[in-house]
Amino acid sequence: MFTGKLVFTQAMDHLPLHTFRRCVQRYDGNRYIKRFSCQEQFRCMAFAQLTYRESLRDIEACLNAQSSKLYHMGIRSTVARSTLADANERRDWRIYADFAQSLIQIARRLYAGEDLGLELDNTVYALDATTIDLCLTVFPWAHFRQTKAAVKLHTLLDLRGNIPSFIHISDGKLHDVNVLDLLLPEPGAFYVMDRGYLDYERLYQLDQSKAFFVIRAKSNLQFRRVSSSPVNKEIGLRCDQIIKLTGYKTSQRYPDVLRRIKFYDASTDKRFVFLTNNITLPALTITELYRYRWQVELFFKWIKQHLRIKSFFGTSENAVKTQVWIAVSVYVLVAIIKKRLGIKASLYSILQILSVTTFETMPIDQLLTGCDQAMKNDETINQLNLFN
């Protein structure tokens, strides 16, 4: 019988701890600290994310109920909710932001060969933001409206593996389009966006950086047609045009030509008009790229449902950002484990299994491989699949 490491510890072993120590050192995270280090804080918060803890009192009760196993989880101190609250309040959130970015780089390398479903070698990003509503009296720093507070999670999602490559946390007042100023465009990459990011001056900067964009046009678009290409209307295409903007301001902000593609979706009876600076790809591929943008919406839905980012353990800006970045780290960690161990099960299934086996000592690869086998067996019998 296997009597080695706990499942939680085996999961944490996939973290590059040398990188974490450098992040802590960069911001003096352990300065003047004699007990409950930044690494212990991270492990406690990661435990809360993996096991769906609802509050600091909940974390304290669950961990202290397994006090004999805390040392084996990498937690050397008795966990008190006041100590964890102080750590979230005072220790620089940038420690965990930098560490999450290092995990993202690892995950993106692992998923670089994923098949996107299109004959396209370029990197494809989907850019969007989601709003997390907060109480104004409890979170007065998170400005949004007169009677409401909120934070926004701006995310650039790499569609090969659905790994967030860029995340910016702001108050609710920051307009989505302003995040384009924070991006460092990658030459040759595609940036797929909704109409909220339609700013011709910023799009022209993307074009000058040799990056491509695909974005929905607004209904009041003013343009003149330069040329047209024939399209197959049987597959939904209505037009493929090279255009020049004619609006007084828009023509100055984007002086080059654009490509305008109109598409009719018979399943929803809706018409879409797309703008892009890529002239060479087939028109249908451009429309398919925009369809893949929905993955970022699914990403937001996933982390809101399965991680703790809608209710917070602290009320300060530092505590909120710390919790969000550790939640992102857990999401990426699960994706890394899935790829390294070659698990076919979904991230949801892996997270569910880890949540109920945290204190077990079964080898994690056998545990998750057993999940794969169970899913295969379920396909051959007429029973409800709990992980669908």
Image (cartoon, helix red, strand yellow):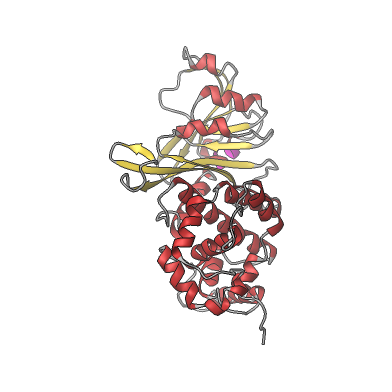
- Position in image of residue 237 (x %, y %): 52, 35
Q: In the depicted view, which residue is nearer to us: 318 or 186? A: 318
> In which quarter of the view is residue 180 placed?
top right
Secondary structure mostly seen in magenta is: helix
Residue 16 to residue 244: above or below: below
- Position in image of residue 32 (x %, y %): 59, 54
Q: Residue at x 65, y 70 (%)?
A: 10
Q: Residue furthest top?
A: 248
Q: Residue furthest bottom?
A: 1
Magenta highlight range: 284-288
Magenta residue check for 286: yes
- Position in image of residue 166 (x %, y %): 58, 43
Q: As drawn, is 242 to the left or to the right of 186? A: left
Residue 73 to residue 113: above or below: below
Q: Residue at x 66, y 30 (%)?
A: 280
Q: Tag count in the figure?
A: 0
Q: As drawn, is 240 to the left or to the right of 57? A: right
Could you tell me which quadrant the N terminus lies in? bottom right
- Position in image of residue 189 (x %, y %): 66, 37
Q: In the depicted view, which residue is nearer to us: 366 or 91? A: 91
> In which quarter of the view is residue 156 placed?
top right
Observer able to see residue 364: yes
Magenta residue check for 43: no
Observer able to see residue 273: no
Q: In the depicted view, which residue is nearer to us: 168 or 36? A: 36
Residue 86 to residue 187: above or below: below
Q: In the depicted view, which residue is nearer to us: 178 or 299? A: 178
Residue 208 to residue 383: above or below: above
